[in-house]
Image (cartoon, rainbow, N blue to C red):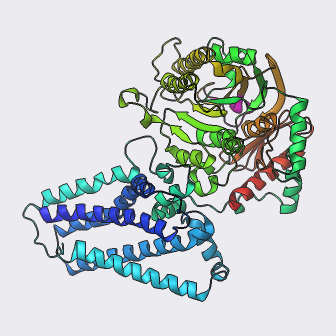
Amino acid sequence: MKERLIGFVKIYVFFVVVFVLQKPLFMFYYHSLFADVSWADYFRVMWHGLPLDFSLAGYLTLLPGLLLIVSAWTLSRALRWVWNGYFLLVSVLLSVIFVTDMALYEYWGFRLDATPLFYFFSSPRDALASVSGWFVACGLLLVVGYAALLYKLFHVVLLRKKNYWRVRIPYRRGSVSLVLLLLTGLLFIPIRGGFSVSTMNTGKVYFSDNQRLNHAATNPAFNLMESLSKQKDFAAQYRYMEADEAARLFATQLDKQVLGMKAGDAGADSLLTGAVLADTLFTTSRPDIVFVILESFSSHLLPTQGGQPDVAPNLDSLANAGVLFTNFYANSFRTDRGLVSILSGYPAQPTTSIMKYPRKTQHLPSIAGKLRQAGYGAHYYYGGDADFTNMRSYLMSSGFESIVADHDFPVSERLSKWGVHDHLVFARLLADLEAESLDADADRKPQFRVLQTSSSHEPFEVPYQRLDNPRLNAFAYTDSCLGDFVRRFSRLPQWKHTLLVLVPDHLGAYPENLGNLVKERYHIPLVLAGGAVQHQGRRIDVYGSQQDLAATLLAQLGLSHGEFTFSKDMLHPSSPHFAYFTFPDAFGRLTDSTRVIFDNQAGRLVICEGPDAELDLQKGKAYLQKLYDDIANK
């Protein structure tokens, strides 16, 4: 038993060591790209990259674990062939992945995923046309050399001295098999990444606002495996019409301020500044900004909008005292999609979530990135697991300097299924604000902060009891946390120059049993409050959705938003005013006169209301087609 148990551990550890050592090799090879990093950053890369290394090592140890069990029952020659063949195959695959990744990173700017494979298998000749024969030859030599080195190391470390097909069959083979089976089963833990809500994904290794360090920490073999499991040909989806017709209809739905202009053009900046002067909501051009993204809230919880009384009195009070957008809609039904819509002005997709693709999200525009260019600091607060659905990689790519998440709180405070209850997250943000107000030497550059709540989510277990309905009680709890935060924050000096933006990530949990293909399923409030808002008690009735928040906010700050292709300034009279949302294989488009919801899977209209419904249906199809074109090109 001893030899086989030691062999099992050695196999797993050996894979981990190989993956860890590949990281400094990658950084040394691209030393010019990492010239400004310290030696400590090399170790940080290796340390933060361990979760993916542990996971992939677990996958690769599964078969050897089973072979060790077989070796307790038979010592056949076939077992030896399988054993050697497996390590030879793994050596070749890891070599091909590592060398290909090293060769392509300079050109692609991201770690190896399924994209090069897609191009190669679509047209091998075209894929290789841009590289010389010498480049290909050198690459092949490196692949062969590295594969031979890996196999040699496998043979020396694992095979030469302990040929497990030659070790005698143990006396208690049943016990040995049971122990080895248990160890093999335990590989589920590193493979999945523990027992948290989120499963292992590339975003778990993102730790720096230097994107190259995040890339260096990424295991290319894991990245490729993850990409292959999700890869879709986005450019082939939702082909409703000819490209020219789609482009024509799409152009009618773009923000008129930036249509035909490149972001940053003098003309665009001038036009944006004019728009701000025409309808200015803020008392200062550079307010501090605090977003509170409210988990699952909806307009159905606000008496101001005809919703339930006495559930969210604090949010309702802020809506009455501030600026309320009354015809505002969520882009989707899930948090990951809603976050990208809010923070990047990018519409949700009906068949995927772009947040799951770090290579694509790193090319998205973002409010955080735009504000940092304007001199803001950017910080994110969340009580849950920031690695869920690659959220961390998205936030770091978006420009956030710091992320406070569940592991930044004591274990004793992680009492919710989703991590830390909302009142503790609000308290953390408030403590940072209070510390800033007390620090006379603090850098007074404006700050952008985002707090994402999580307690108003299944299973609705909160440290609060006011309403009998557990769903409504959870919303009431989060609302009470918001109210307490605002009351205490309003006493601080920063309040007078702070814009507070309150927006849900999506509608969820209430109303119960609400259909997915009705407009009420996506109706949410957008509230602007705080000391920096000068139009108190204002109602804005134009139609818009989460993706439009970016352009509207940036226009109010006098910042161009041309890179936010899908976002519209809701306050500009020449902007097309419509709301857009998606559900798996369905989309909706709403205006003040038209309601269109189309079920693509069924190929039919679920709702078709208004005089221009047929034209709006075609616009909605063109919009979705161009969205998937854009995803395919990122």
Q: Residue at x 18, y 62 (%)?
A: 6
Q: Quadrant of the C terminus?
A: bottom right
Q: Position of residue 209 (x, y in %)?
A: 56, 49
Residue situated furthest front in the rendering:
441
The residue lying at 80 percent from left, 48 percent from top is 562
The total number of labels drawn is 0
The residue drawn where x is 10% and y is 72% is: 168
Question: Is 383 on the left-hand or right-hand side of 248?
Answer: left
| Residue 575 relative to residue 464: left or right | right
Left or right placement of residue 357 versus residue 170 in this view = right
State the image quarter where residue 158 is shown.
bottom left
- Spot occupied by residue 503 in the image (x, y as percentages of width and height): 67, 29
Depth check, front residue: 297 or 181: 297
- Percent position of residue 538, x then y: 81, 19
Does the image show residue 420?
yes
Q: In the rendered view of the protein, which quadrant contains the N terminus?
A: bottom left
- Residue 530 visible? The answer is no
Front-most of 335 and 290?
290
Residue 203 in the image: state x and y as whole percent: 51, 50
Look at the picture and state if 162 lies above or below 376.
below
Rendering quarter of residue 271: top right
Residue 100 relative to residue 360: left or right: left
Residue 519 highlighted magenta (yes or no)? yes
Magenta run includes residue 297: no
In the figure, residue 56 lies in which quadrant?
Answer: bottom left
Q: Which residues are magenta?
A: 512-524
Q: Looking at the image, is 250 positioned above or below residue 578?
A: below
In front here: 229 or 150? 150
Name the residue furthest left: 171
